[in-house]
Amino acid sequence: MNDAKILLVDDEEELRRSTAQALELSGFSVETYSNGDHVLELIGYSFPGVVVSDIRMPGMDGMTLMQKIRELDPEVPVILVTGHGDVQLAVKAMREGAYDFIEKPFTPEMLAGVIRRAMERRGLVLENRLLKAVAGKRDDIEARLPGRTQVMVDLRYRIRAIGASDADTLIVGETGAGKEVVARALHDISARASRPFIAINCAALPANLIESELFGHEVGAFPGAVRPRYGKFEHGRGGTILLDEIGSMPFDLQAKFLRVLQERVISRLGSNEVVALDVRFIATSKVDLEAEVAAGRFRADLFYRLNVATLHVPSLSQRRADVPLLFLQLVREAAARYARDEMAVPPDVISDIAQRDWPGNVRELRNAADRLVLGLDNGGRQAEEATGLAERVAEFERGVIASALVAHGGSLRPVYESLGISRKTLYEKMQKYGLDKKLLATEISGEGQRDT
């Protein structure tokens, strides 16, 4: 990894500077940060490096930073630096996915050795992902946006086609459908992957500060502006700016943003100086912007400027055949995230999940998976608890077979081969547990739409 880097996070300036200097003398490329906020903007599936963070920091501590990094990519190595009294906390962090921990005081050689091993591991992960993609196997895009229905196959194809370009993109979809996941995928497969990914929620920015947040300001630009400040646009130079729910952007600000899109320059508030802007813009919307234009709430010229490359993210109601497989994947991810053992989802839960409506889309389905893994409920249903050993074994066996059937889309051969049983035994157990009636009808209905 020639572009490998270390993101060093520590709120103590002197320690941060001395550690960075020692690592640079050891041949590493180091970027330093006083907190983890900006670090998260640099993390993605193609991030070529490791994160070294102190555990005890004001605001976002090292544990929280590690958890947020694992949500973006669970295979990014995070090395935690601990004080003498934090060893138990560090051991807990190791169980939750930290790569390693270093106790203060440490020698530069010790830290450098851990980092080299972490770099080698990260390099192997990225190389393996690249080889899978080249071989046409399941790649990161499919892992992040799974589904066998034709609408998902088409979406992944368009992401791969658009992602490699520098085209500004509009992503349209219902709340919770995965618009930000699509935006991050576009960024991660682009040439800008190693640069910042800045997500801006247009609906959450305070109306009186939105221009300052986006464009920055000079001293005295408005009451309270006592020091100059970079805006979000300028901070994201070289990378990708995500404007989440752009339909919520105030109408008067839309004209200024249109100029930024067209000319790729900005001026901070209180300044006449023009700053060049090298960024890619991605916008998302849960509303029909064309209808907003007709209603006079969104500028037509801005809509047509954004509408060059458009991606439509389907709701779960548009891809119901994907729901069982997606739920099983979310359960596996939740088990890893909460450091729980992988669990076999009972077939009655899978059947119920497949039949229910999910107005909150993937976000709502993920919450259901989390609750199941944490034991807060049983996927929305109360299951009868098996009391005897035989009943427990039967329920476990039934769940394993049901999960395998759903995972392989109802195709029997890979099921009995993966379980190490004969075809006849599989038929007998399916008949015993009634799985042919409870599961296959749901999955086989989508047989002709599978990703090939």
Image: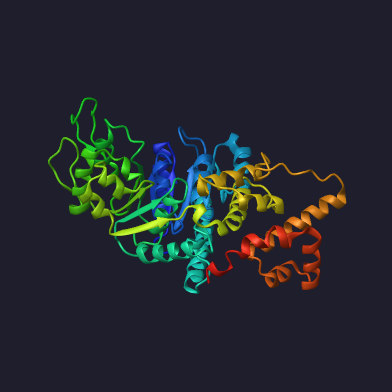
Residue 415 % position (x, y)? 70, 68
Residue at the extreme bottom of the image, as rendered:
135
Residue 10 % position (x, y)? 44, 40
Which of 395/279 is in front? 395
Q: Is residue 181 left or right of residue 281?
A: right
Residue 270 % position (x, y)? 16, 35
Q: Is residue 155 left or right of residue 114?
A: left
Question: What coloring was used for the rendering?
Answer: rainbow
Which residue appears at 34% of the width and 62% of the height?
Answer: 191
Which residue appears at 73% of the width and 55% of the height?
Answer: 399
Which of 41/210 is in front? 210
Q: Is residue 358 above or below residue 420?
A: above
Which residue appears at 26% of the width and 46% of the height?
Answer: 293
Residue at the extreme top of the image, as rendered:
223
Residue at the extreme left of the image, as rendered:
272
Which residue appears at 60% of the width and 64% of the height?
Answer: 445
Q: Where is residue 255, by image quadrant?
A: top left
Image quadrant for the N terminus? bottom left
Q: Is residue 448 left or right of residue 408?
A: left
Q: Is residue 44 above or below residue 154?
A: above
Q: Is residue 25 above or below residue 225?
A: below
> Is residue 193 visible to the viewer in this orientation of the structure?
no
Which of 66/281 is in front? 281
Residue 220 % position (x, y)? 18, 29
Q: Where is residue 394, by image quadrant?
A: bottom right
> Is residue 172 visible to the viewer in this orientation of the structure?
yes
Count of numbered circles on the image = 0
